[in-house]
Image (cartoon, coloured by chain):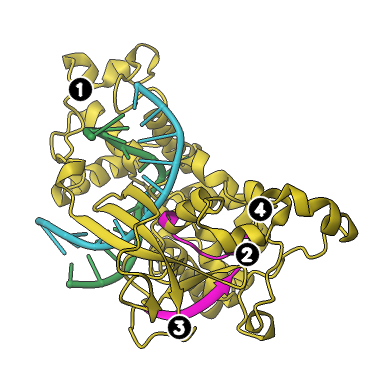
Chain colours: A yellow, B cyan, C green
DNA sequence: AATGCGGGGTC
DNA sequence: GACCCAGCATT
């Protein structure tokens, strides 16, 4: 989880993850849908798939117990040079170096390394330096502490902008501090401006049936949002809508390498069958409350969140009349016991409940607040 | 050696 | 907006 993701962001995900998958075995045998659901919102979803592959690898090849050497760890799916070094040094005390974004910044400044830190040559030089530091470590010192110290330095004093060199313990050894080149180092390749990113324009469909929203699951095991659920895209399902029907919602979002522009229109679906289109491999009706338990990419999640109370989201409203019509309230309401159904069960089973327009009744708005986040 | 892959905090 | 986060796998 910590690969390219801040600690503060990870923590709540990690808590839920460990509760859901307490052991390597539990993760290894879990349905991919559950794995992606627990990851949804974190991004870089191949990490989730690789983590499960890694768990299966550990179960199959190591009897469920993680190997301890960096070289062995490196062969596990999802564990690259950084993670192998981190586990080996911090968890098992091996004198294994590591270089992450923080360490790269610290070393580039301290040693005045002028190569692009992402480039092959830059990485090689950084790993060499990190290895030399590790080799110079006194025999009674903990290798993990050196690595964590370097990372922590990068996360605190040696910040990307405005480094606080005054209190830095390495200031007297630092080339960048000595020469006042903190702003020039590390050298990092210029990234594309947002307005230069390729734009993905998507037209998604808001289809309600029996108080539920229609979602589809993307099929591929690789590629953007692979295995995640989303609103159906026009042209990929057997849906109909008035040609002149206006877009009722929109959502813009910037990815690291794409700009996403989503528009939504209300549609109806002729048949709830998996389209022959290979883009999706499943289609389901899902109550909004249950949707939050699926692995849903951020764009669709944001649209569901933003527009579930919109005037045109009619079925959704009738699914939770306590908010919609104050009049009907007194009569029907009080009769019914409050928390009738918990809207538990996350995975949408294609069974009886969705058949007769029954199903997900009052799911709508109750739990929405406590789940996102 | 380069590219694909997310999402969000923070300045 | 721009920057970047306890990177990895694939091409």
Q: Which residue is mark 2?
A: A290
The Cα–Cα distance between marks 1 and 4, rounded to whole angstroms, is: 48 Å
Identify whether A195 is placed above or below A199.
above
The Cα–Cα distance between marks 3 and 2, rounded to whole angstroms, is: 23 Å
Q: Under tag 2, what secondary structure?
A: helix
Q: Looking at the image, how many numbered discs can be counted on the residues?
A: 4
Marking on residue A270: 3
Q: Earlier in the sequence, mark 3 or mark 4?
A: 3
Q: Position of residue A123 (x, y in %)?
A: 21, 47
Q: Marks 2 and 1: which is nearer the front?
A: 2
Q: Which residue is mark 1?
A: A183
Q: Earlier in the sequence, mark 3 or mark 1?
A: 1
Q: Position of residue A59 (x, y in %)?
A: 56, 76
Q: Position of residue A61 (x, y in %)?
A: 50, 78
> In the image, what residue occupies the spot 26% across and 46% down?
A127
Q: Which residue is mark 4?
A: A365
Q: Under tag 3, what secondary structure?
A: loop
The Cα–Cα distance between marks 3 and 1, rounded to whole angstroms, is: 59 Å
Q: Marks 2 and 4: which is nearer the front?
A: 4
Q: Chain of mark 4?
A: A
């Amino acid at each position: 989880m910590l690969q390219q993701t801040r600690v503060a962001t990870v923590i709540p995900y990690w808590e839920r993850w460990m509760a859901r998958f307490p052991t390597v075995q539990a993760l290894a045998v879990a349905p991919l849908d559950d794995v992606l659901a627990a990851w949804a919102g974190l991004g870089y979803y191949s990490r989730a798939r690789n983590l499960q592959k890694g768990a299966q690898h550990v179960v199959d090849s190591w009897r469920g117990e993680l190997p301890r050497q960096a070289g062995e760890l490196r062969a596990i799916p999802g564990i690259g040079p950084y993670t192998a070094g981190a586990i080996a040094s911090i968890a098992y005390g091996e004198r294994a170096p590591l270089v992450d974004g923080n360490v790269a910044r610290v070393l580039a400044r301290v040693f005045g390394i002028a190569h692009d830190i992402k480039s092959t040559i830059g990485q090689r030089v950084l790993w060499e330096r990190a290895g030399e530091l590790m080799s110079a470590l006194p025999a009674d010192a903990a290798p993990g502490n050196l690595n964590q110290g370097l990372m922590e330095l990068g996360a605190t004093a040696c910040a990307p902008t405005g480094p606080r060199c005054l209190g830095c313990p390495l200031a007297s050894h630092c080339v960048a501090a000595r020469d006042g080149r903190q702003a020039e180092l590390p050298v990092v390749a210029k990234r594309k401006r947002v307005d230069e990113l390729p734009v993905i324009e998507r037209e998604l469909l808001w289809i309600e049936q029996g108080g539920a929203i229609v979602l589809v699951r993307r099929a591929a095991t690789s590629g953007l949002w692979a295995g995640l659920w989303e609103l159906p895209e026009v042209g990929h399902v057997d849906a109909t809508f008035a040609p002149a029907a206006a877009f009722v919602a929109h959502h813009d979002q910037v990815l690291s390498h794409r700009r996403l522009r989503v528009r939504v229109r209300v549609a109806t679906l002729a048949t709830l069958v998996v389209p022959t289109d290979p883009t999706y491999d499943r289609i389901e009706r899902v109550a909004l409350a249950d949707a939050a338990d699926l692995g849903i990419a951020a764009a669709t999640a944001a649209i569901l969140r933003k527009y579930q109370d919109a005037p045109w989201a009619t079925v959704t409203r009738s699914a939770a009349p306590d908010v919609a019509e104050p009049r009907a309230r007194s009569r029907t309401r009080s009769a019914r016991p409050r928390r009738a159904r918990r809207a538990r069960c996350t995975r949408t089973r294609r069974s009886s409940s969705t058949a007769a327009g029954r199903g997900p009744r009052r799911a709508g708005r109750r739990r929405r607040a406590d789940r996102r986040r």
